[in-house]
Image (cartoon, rainbow, N blue to C red):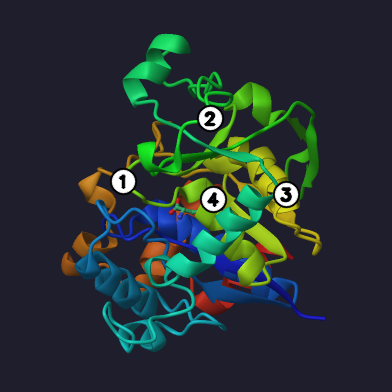
Amino acid sequence: MVWRTRFAPAPTGYLHLGHVVNAIHVWGIARAFGGEVLLRIEDHDRTRCRDDYEDALLDDLDWLGFVPDVGRTDSFRASRHGHPHGHPQRQSDNEARYAAALASLGARDVTYVCTCTRRDIARHAPHAPGEEPRYPGTCRDARHAETESLARRVCMDGGMELFDDRRLGPMRQSPADQCGDVLVRDRHGQWTYQFAVVVDDMAHDIDVVIRGEDLLASTGRQLRLAAMLGRERPLHWWHHPLLVHPDGSKLSKANRDTSIRERRAAGVCAAALLGEAAFLSGLLPAARDLSIDELPALFR
Ligand code: GLU
């Protein structure tokens, strides 16, 4: 049986070397072990996503040589925003999918209306800078009317989520302690990353999630949400190292020197960029030109 993974960038900026590291893992592992890759455009946050970033990321993927098995780049170009049918793998075209998932949780009485602002949460649940705020459950029993806010949370009761990360080994996470009740739609009516990604990984029959370690802490709550939504297909995880500069500093998305656009404009070739990303994420002992056909060998 062919298993499926996904590459799921958010068009909130240009692709950078960190995305290339992720794509190398996604395509390399899929090609090495008989999986297929689905491309999903994660534009759930309409305030930050832009159509020209989507165009640029499709173009950069083509240039780098990453060809999805499901959701070819041309299929996204052919279904621009406003196209009557949209695209099954562009989040902003699939509102109804998230609304139905929320309704199914609502029917089980595990969701509630939340009227808290970020400032309210910071006041009730102080946390150190860089630390994740834990929602203290302020609105859980308040029974606010549906009209009071569009924001909805899903109850995270106590208990551990256990999973076996393919790289990091056995993991235990407690969503109730880490983040508390998960926000699934914000007060502007936008679906959150945590919710959209779970609903989509189910809708797209994803078997293995291959992504950076920065998202490791989200895995427990995503497993919990998936179980609440009735996911039966097992889901596997492979969290890969993040890209670090040779001086040890982490890559920032705002770091302009790493945008693929600019590197292309400066005349760098795709093989050099692939080699640089593979080196900076520890997959190669030194930077060298790397062709897309060599990726599976990095993981076998
Ligand atoms: N859209 C997310 C990002 O660009 C990736 C989501 C995921 O892999 O779970 O960081």
- Marks 2/1 in contact by CB < 8 Å: the verdict is no
Check residue 188 in the rendering and tell me which mark sits there, or answer none.
1
In the rendered view, tell whether residue 186 sits above or below residue 268: above
Gap in angstroms between the C-alphas marked 3 and 1? 24 Å
Q: Check disc 4 and report its element: helix, strand or loop.
A: helix
Q: Position of residue 145 (x, y in %)?
A: 45, 37
Q: Check disc 1 and report its element: helix, strand or loop.
A: loop
* Mark 2 and mark 1: Cα distance apart in space: 19 Å
Q: Is residue 200 left or right of residue 40?
A: right
Of residues 142 and 39, the one nearer the viewer is 142
Q: Is mark 2 within 8 Å of ligand 1?
A: no
Q: Quick check: 77 left or right of 195?
A: left
* Real-space Cα separation, disc 4 to disc 1, in angstroms: 15 Å
Q: Nearer the viewer, residue 132 or 216?
A: 132
Tag 4: residue type?
Phe
Q: Residue 142: where, in percent of width, then height?
A: 52, 24
Do we see residue 129 in this rendering? no
Mark 4 vs mark 1: which is more N-terminal?
Answer: 1
Q: Residue at x 41, y 38 (%)?
A: 246
Instruction: Tell me the residue that label 2 is attached to.
Output: 143
Q: Secondary structure at mark 3?
A: helix
Tell which circle, 2 or 3, labels the residue nearer the N-terminal end: 2
Q: Position of residue 155 (x, y in %)?
A: 64, 34
Which residue is tagged 3? Answer: 228
| Mark 3 or 4, nearer chain start | 4
Residue 237 is labelled as: none
Q: Are marks 4 and 1 in contact (CB under 8 Å)?
A: no
Q: Which residue is mark 4?
A: 195
